[in-house]
């Protein structure tokens, strides 16, 4: 190769150089959206209590290495639009919520229909696109889905509260149904994410892992919703290396679920580990692994390869309500040997398990 060709080949691989935001060692203070542009020039950003005008996103595009301190509660004005209400992006960020609240004013939107109908609800409420740490933040009453997480590098989210408990009751627009609907806690399509030591009370999945690898969900408490979910899995996605550990799941539809779409093709779900989870009062199933989503225990699809689903380590101990099934497994394309030696489910009645690769478990 001539020197010229070598140079040309080399240049072809030089990525665009994007100017990083100039990080200055100063403290910016935000008391309204007008302050944001100046404040994000600094590597310390303090946020005071204020109300975000209806129909606007409170968006922080932070310089690498920024520390954010939430010093008061943030309330979002109400408007029927897509959202998000809050978005934060940046690398190596330290986000300290200091126990303060983002209030989504959910009751002003809730009509029991979530994102399936009724009025338009801004969702997700909180879009997290940082690496680093994000901790001690409370979200009160999200209109629909609460967090969507797509971190650019490793992120640890800890000591968070999602309180949509007010959505359990019906309201004048919900026709007798719980007013909150589709209020997922965390929707994750990402890698290298840990969510821990958090409290979630909602009306849908506590966490839904739709895609990605190296995700840990541990020591969280999930109340009222649809449990800890892998999926729903669509076509051409890979999920692997997921650890669901030491969580407490109370009065959910099911404690632990894997749901793959019957229509999905070219997808792989593997290496899912459950350890030390405790569940009480499941309304439908203790554990549900179902390849027929959105049908429950319908005809499963064969386009999602599912393997390596293990209950190991500390016993997973789950009790279900009297009308519920303990464990149901509905496989279309399951493979390998699954070690279920650390699963104990009690109450209700046995479900149907139609996969023969499960070892060390009987219900
Ligand atoms: C399974 O995932 C865990 C992390 O959850 C990882 O440490 C391990 O190496 C993975 N195993 C395989 C066979 O990929
Ligand atoms: C599980 O049951 C479903 C529904 O009856 C059936 O379509 C599927 O082929 C079964 N899978 C296995 C592995 O037996």
Image (spheres, helix red, strand yellow):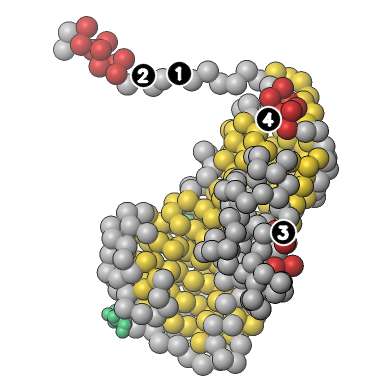
Name the residue beneath numbered marker 2.
Answer: 14
Q: Which of marks 3 and 2 is in front?
A: 3
Q: Mark 4 points at which residue?
A: 66
Q: Does the residue labelled 1 lie within 8 Å of ligand 1?
A: no
Q: Sequence order check: which comes first, mark 3 or mark 4?
A: 4
Ligand 1 closer than 8 Å to label 2 CB? no
Task: Give the x, y percent position of residue 144.
Answer: 61, 59
Per the rendering, the mark at residue 17 is 1
Position of 62 compared to 272: left or right? right
Of label 3 and label 2, which has the lower sequence position? 2
Above or below, 101 relative to 201: above
Q: Which residue is drawn at 54% across and 55% down?
A: 187
Judged by depth in the image, the label closer to the viewer, 1 or 3, is 3
| Ligand 1 quadrant in view | bottom left
Q: Is residue 350 above or below residue 146?
A: below
- Residue at point 39%, 84% (across, down): 353
Q: Earlier in the sequence, mark 1 or mark 4?
A: 1
Q: Report how far apart the C-alphas of labels 2 and 1 lie in the structure.
A: 8 Å
Viewer can see residue 223? no
Q: Distance between the residues labelled 3 and 4?
A: 34 Å
* Mark 4 touches mark 2? (CB < 8 Å): no
Q: Determine whether the residue tagged by mark 4 lies in a helix, strand or loop.
A: loop
Q: Foreground: 107 or 192?
A: 107
Q: Where is residue 173 in the image (x, y as percent from the top left)?
A: 67, 69
Sequence-wise, which precedes: disc 4 or disc 2?
2
Cβ atoms under marks 1 and 3 closer than 8 Å: no
On residue 108, the disc is: 3
Judging depth in this view, the residue of 280 and 53 nearest the camera is 53
Give residue 341's position: percent from left, percent from top: 48, 78
Query: Is mark 1 in CB contact (under 8 Å) with mark 4?
Result: no
């Amino acid at each position: 190769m001539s020197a010229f060709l070598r140079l040309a080949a080399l240049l072809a691989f030089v990525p665009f150089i994007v100017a990083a935001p100039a990080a200055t060692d100063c403290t910016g203070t935000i008391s309204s959206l007008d302050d944001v542009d100046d404040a994000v020039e600094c590597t310390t950003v303090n946020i005071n209590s204020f109300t975000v005008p209806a129909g606007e996103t409170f968006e922080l595009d932070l310089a690498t290495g920024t520390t954010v301190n939430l010093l008061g509660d943030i309330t979002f004005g109400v408007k029927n639009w897509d959202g998000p209400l809050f978005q934060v992006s940046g690398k190596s960020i330290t986000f300290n919520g200091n126990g303060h609240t983002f209030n989504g004013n959910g009751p002003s939107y809730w009509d029991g229909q979530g994102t399936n109908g009724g009025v338009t609800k801004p969702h997700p409420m909180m879009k997290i696109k940082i690496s680093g740490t994000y901790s001690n933040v409370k979200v009160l009453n999200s209109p629909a889905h609460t967090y969507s997480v797509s971190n650019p590098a490793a992120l640890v989210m800890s000591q968070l509260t999602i309180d949509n408990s007010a959505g359990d009751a019906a309201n004048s627009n919900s026709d007798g149904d719980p007013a909150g609907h589709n209020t997922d806690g965390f929707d994750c399509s990402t890698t290298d994410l840990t969510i821990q030591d958090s409290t979630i009370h909602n009306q849908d999945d506590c966490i839904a892992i739709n895609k990605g690898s190296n995700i840990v969900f541990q020591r969280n408490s999930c109340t009222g919703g649809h449990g800890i979910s892998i999926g729903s899995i669509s076509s051409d996605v890979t999920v692997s290396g997921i650890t669901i550990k030491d969580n407490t799941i109370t009065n959910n539809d099911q404690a632990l679920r894997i749901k793959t779409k019957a229509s999905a093709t070219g997808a792989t779900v593997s290496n899912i580990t459950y350890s030390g989870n405790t569940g009480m009062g499941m309304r439908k199933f203790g554990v549900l692994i179902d390849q027929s989503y959105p049908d429950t225990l319908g005809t499963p699809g064969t386009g999602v390869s599912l393997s390596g689903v293990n209950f190991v380590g500390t016993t997973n101990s789950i009790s279900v309500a009297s009308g519920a099934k303990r464990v149901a497994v509905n496989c279309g394309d399951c493979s390998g040997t699954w070690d279920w030696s650390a699963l104990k489910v009690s109450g209700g009645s046995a479900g149907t398990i139609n996969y023969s690769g499960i070892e060390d478990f009987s219900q």
